[in-house]
Image (cartoon, rainbow, N blue to C red):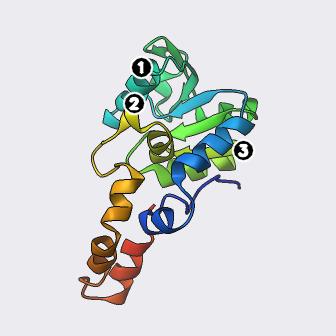
Amino acid sequence: MSISNLNSLNPLNAALDRDPAEFFRDIEWECPGGIILGGARGIVSDHARQGLRRMNRPLVAIVDNDSSLWGKAVDGVPVLPPSAAADYPTAIFVVAVFTHTPFREQLASLGAKHVVAYASLFHAYPDAFLPFFAVDRITHLRERLSGVREAADIWADQESSELYRQIH
């Protein structure tokens, strides 16, 4: 299984290590097959499609687990089953659902080579996407990094603190 940035979207790591915008643009460079969106419905998917449209970046397809959508189109983009992931080896799959990790893992297990969460795309093109709920410009996160770290210390138990630090 290959998930391109399973841990790079952890806010603490992103602020300290590699800029997620840079990360996405590097992967995008390696993926001439275009962008395939994971998730056909919902506020994240809607926002991703709208932002890409503003950028004049057409989607190749959308993959979704809802079989009632397969073979149909959303905003003129065909909806495919996740099993189609292997048919697009040079595409970047941007999973645009809030609980993205299970879907990212599913797509990777089905043969998608480059799978990222929506925040990577949003960070790469902040003028088109940000701010969006808890996702904001990485510079804003860096400015507030000490507060983000301090928040990890408010948890009553070690397990909760560790889970907070691993959010991605």
Residue depicted at x 45% and y 71%:
166
Residue bearing mark 2: 128
User: What's the amino acid at mark 3?
Assistant: Lys
Task: State which quadrant residue 60 falls in.
Answer: top right
Residue depicted at x 44% and y 69%:
12
Label 3 CA crowd tier, 10 Å (few <14, some 14–19, many 20+): many
SS class of the residue under badge 3? loop
Task: State which quadrant residue 7 falls in.
Answer: bottom right
Label of residue 54 in the image: 1
Of labels 2 and 3, earlier in sequence is 3
Q: Are marks 1 and 3 in contact (CB under 8 Å)?
A: no
SS class of the residue under badge 1? helix
- Tell us which disc is closer to us: 2 or 3: 2
In front: 159, or 124?
Answer: 124
Q: Are marks 1 and 2 in contact (CB under 8 Å)?
A: yes
* Above or below for 125 versus 104: above
Q: Is 133 situated left or right of 2 in this image?
A: left
On the image, the x and y values in percent for residue 153 come to 29, 84
- State how far apart marks 1 and 2 are (Cα): 7 Å
In front: 141, or 121?
Answer: 141
User: What's the amino acid at mark 1?
Assistant: Arg
Label of residue 113 in the image: 3
Of labels 1 and 2, earlier in sequence is 1
Residue depicted at x 33% and y 63%:
143
User: What's the amino acid at mark 2?
Assistant: Ala
- Tell us which disc is closer to us: 1 or 3: 1
On the image, the x and y values in percent for residue 61 come to 58, 23
Q: Is 81 situated left or right of 33 in this image?
A: left
Of labels 1 and 3, earlier in sequence is 1
